[in-house]
Amino acid sequence: MSVGNHFSLKEDEPDTFQRRTRIFFGLTVLVFVIFFLRLFFLQVIKGPYYREIARKRTLKSIFLSAPRGNIFDRRGLLLAGNVPSFALSLDIKVVHGPAGDEILRRLAKLLGEDFPSLKQRYLFLRKRATTGEVILEQDLDRDLVAQIEARRFYLPGVQIKVEPERYYPLGPKAFHLVGYVSRISAKELEKLGNKGFDASDFLGRTGLEREFDAVLRGKKGRRLVEVDARGRVRKVVAEEPPIIGNSLVLTVDSFIQQTTYRVLGNVAGAMVIMSPRDGHLLALVSRPSVDPVYFVKKFPPKLWQKINRDKRSPLMNKALAAYPPGSTFKVVTAIAALTKGVVTPETTVFCPGYYRLGRRLFRCWKWGGHGEVNLIKALEVSCDVYFYYLGEQVGIDYLSKIAHECGLGELTGLGFVEESPGLIPSRAWKERVYRRPWQKGETLNVAIGQGAVKVTPLQLARLYAAIVNGGKLYRPWCVARIVDPYGQIIKEYGPEVVARLPIPPRDLSFIRKGLVAAVNAKDGTGRAAALKNILVGGKTGTAQIVSMKRRIHSKKLPYLKRDHAWFVAYAPAEAPEIVTVVFIEHGGHGGSVAAPVAKKFLKAYFEGGK
Amino acid sequence: MQGVKNLFDWKILSIILALLVAGGLNQASAAMGGLFFKRQLLWFALGLSIFTVLAFTDYRKLLTPRVLIILYTILLLSLVVLFLKHTRWLRMAGFGIQPSEFAKLVLIGIFSLLLAQRKDTQYLDLKTFLLMSAFAFPVIILVAVTDLDQGGMLFLLYASYIVMAGIPRRYAVALFLVTVFLVFIVGPDLWNKLKPYQRERVEAFLNPEAYRLSRGYQILQALIAVGSGGLKGLGFHKGLSSRLNFLPEKHTDLAFAVWAEEWGFLGAAFVLALFGALILIILKTAYQTRDELGRYLCFGVATMLFWEVTINAGGILHLLPVASVPLPFLSYGGSSVLVNLAGLGLVFAVSRRRYSFR
Ligand SMILES: [Zn+2]
């Protein structure tokens, strides 16, 4: 400021203009002081607060989905893997208004859909969009992908997203064993949302996909990106790559699995193929089945309706569900009687065609009876009277104890949540459930596998495996090892003996003789399973669903009242390689319905015949 | 003080240059693709030429009634054209010209001339008042039709001149009463008659969170941008909000938010201090100037700058409702740059001779 200025300011009395200028001067100073204070407050005092908001607004964490691990059979053939799937994603911030309509119009042309319906669908999805994008179409075919990519320039905000999608080469043939994955539901997401799951995730629902979900899932990666106001990624700030899930190598053989599926035919039922040598599974089939691909993609509504209405329950894994075992249970009664010493293998019982207990008559399945039968004969002809006698002699308490020691009424340790433990009735059970005392006659029913007894095909498979391998009750297993994406073994599984049958090996051999006779002897009930060159052992079972005074041929009954047909077979009898359980729900007579299926399988297995 | 040689006001000049540098830097950061930056530099160059011409011309010979009437007529005509076309812009050779900006300068000239010629310097006489209003209102109304904010800006300029000219106490009291009446009696009715988007602006100011996605968006994003600048700022070209397009109108209305984000409190306070100093220096020049036309010219330019800065920065700092008024030099806009530099050129010219015309 020059001296002259001061001089001039002080020289005269200020005029009106100058006085008012002073007021304006003061007002200006006041306003700017307010600005400075406000600026200081916003930037220095509230600075960290706003910086945090800005950071949150611009940083977005994106999950990078980890490809799920594969499931291989024992030969290394794929049972579950991933294929790239193309989804049509629309940016909701770009596709809106008149410009958005133009984009949708172009898309409608490419998709072969009319514009109004496409727009309606888009608006509907857009309302529920949570991530700023709408997946308009999943699973695009490659031609369409190519067409859209070629017109990228004219389709702003339209993106083709590539995601790994679960793929099951065997489709329905291995559905119950391998299981399936499906997209996480809104409800589950509420529960799992804070555990790193998001709406694009798939969860293992059944079978191995479920049991080994954590192993197969891998670990999601995360990408921290900076997004602009339109939600577009501008810069990757940090990235944590996803870790691919580990893979499973099974003991199951996909050829055997397919053969099993084929020979079981179009019935409701299940088959289990197990190695008696160490309890590993070669195949596990349940029918009818479903192609798991529909769970991954989408069920056509009609198909879904049909599956849900099907009384043969396609979704249920019947190999792990419990049913009355019929005569296949007789080996348990035999083991109980032999270990208790109420009979020896040589002891004979006379079968007049019925068994008298007090004033009640219990019929043998054969009108007229079997005459004198010993253990081997009784197994061969499946004489009910013989086992009524044994049952009465050992009593329900002992019989139920032995049944449990044979692995029945208990989970096998396979690990599938679908597995039922089955049911071995006992006094305590009856009193708990029916509040009535046990009746002696019920023991007789249990002795021949009728009444309340329920076992799973898998339980029977491992029981018969134990019978043929000298008494070792294995944990059934189907995963041989877990390997990482590079093939390095992470974990290896092996045979586990869970228990031993409570019977000396010598007595077991009599039971096996009876089982061989049942297939090969003149009067054997399982002759339909006999092979020319291979000695087969086995046991039929026909489980009644409704008790009737007289046996009526199953085919005359309504489907849901028909008998269950069972056949358990093993071969070669001298040195058994496989045990196979055939269960056909409401199939009718075990010897004539289930045994031929077992034969077909064994023939294919040993002779490679079709 | 006659005979004192012409003064050269280095202070005004250096403040202007500092503001131009800040404006250039800010456009370099905010503008996309550099187009706005280059154009802004072009406007700066053009503006400085006008500044220089005006600074070294005798403003008394320039601002004659005849010149102002011609300018006023051109202004009115172009405003009518705009009104008919429903636009704010006059397209000329690829550049948009905003006559509403030039209206400020023309009105400043007319007001100054009218006030300089009156006899009673204590209070505003009726004749002068009516003349001022007769010139002001057609322009204000025509501008407000297409650009309410600029219309309001012109009204503030007009009101400032009226206050400066001096309102007799009884009129002031009457005006006060009329205002109270308008606010409390007619106000609510008027409020309801406003268009929703006009009401929304005030409502968004009072509660920006509730209007987060519409009007309030601008307020919130501006606050976030300013606040996250902190003390030292995020650095040139590093502002998250501007780089990631969170700031709408970042090179025009919200240019100051970009500046505050990148240069922090130090930078923002510096720019505000430059404006404050500039306005105060001009007011001081007005104070020192004995020439009636000169002092009112200075007062007008100071008032224009004051309202521009107050409305723009006040909106960004959430002290006032956001209005679309550019911040001189920091906001992109040719008309704004030219008008402000021309006004400052006049001030400079006045300042050079402030002691010469006693
Ligand atoms: Zn019999």
Image (tube, coloured by chain):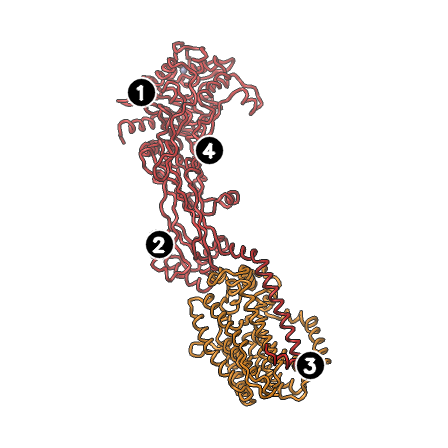
Three-letter amino acid code at the position of disc 2: Val
Nearer the observer: mark 3 or 2; the answer is 3
Q: Is residue A312 left or right of residue A75?
A: right
Q: Which of A221/B56 is in front?
A: B56
Q: Which of A420/B71 is in front?
A: B71
Q: Are marks 4 and 3 on the same chain?
A: no
Q: The chain coloured orange carries which letter? A: B
Q: How many marks?
A: 4
Q: Quadrant of residue B216?
A: bottom right
Quadrant including the N terminus of chain A: bottom right
For label 3, the SS is loop
Q: Which mark is residue A145?
A: 2
Beta carbon at label 3 within 8 Å of ligand 1: no
Q: Position of residue A78 (x, y in %)?
A: 33, 38
Nearer the observer: mark 4 or 3; the answer is 3
The outermost residue toward the bottom is B66
Please name the residue that numbered disc 4 is placed on: A417
Residues at discs 1 and 2 in contact (Cβ within 8 Å): no
- Going 38% across and 54% down the picture, which residue do you hit? A160
Q: Position of residue A191 (x, y in %)?
A: 52, 43
Beta carbon at label 1 within 8 Å of ligand 1: no
Q: Are marks 4 and 1 on the same chain?
A: yes
Q: Which of A72/A140 is in front?
A: A72
Please name the residue that numbered disc 3 is placed on: B167
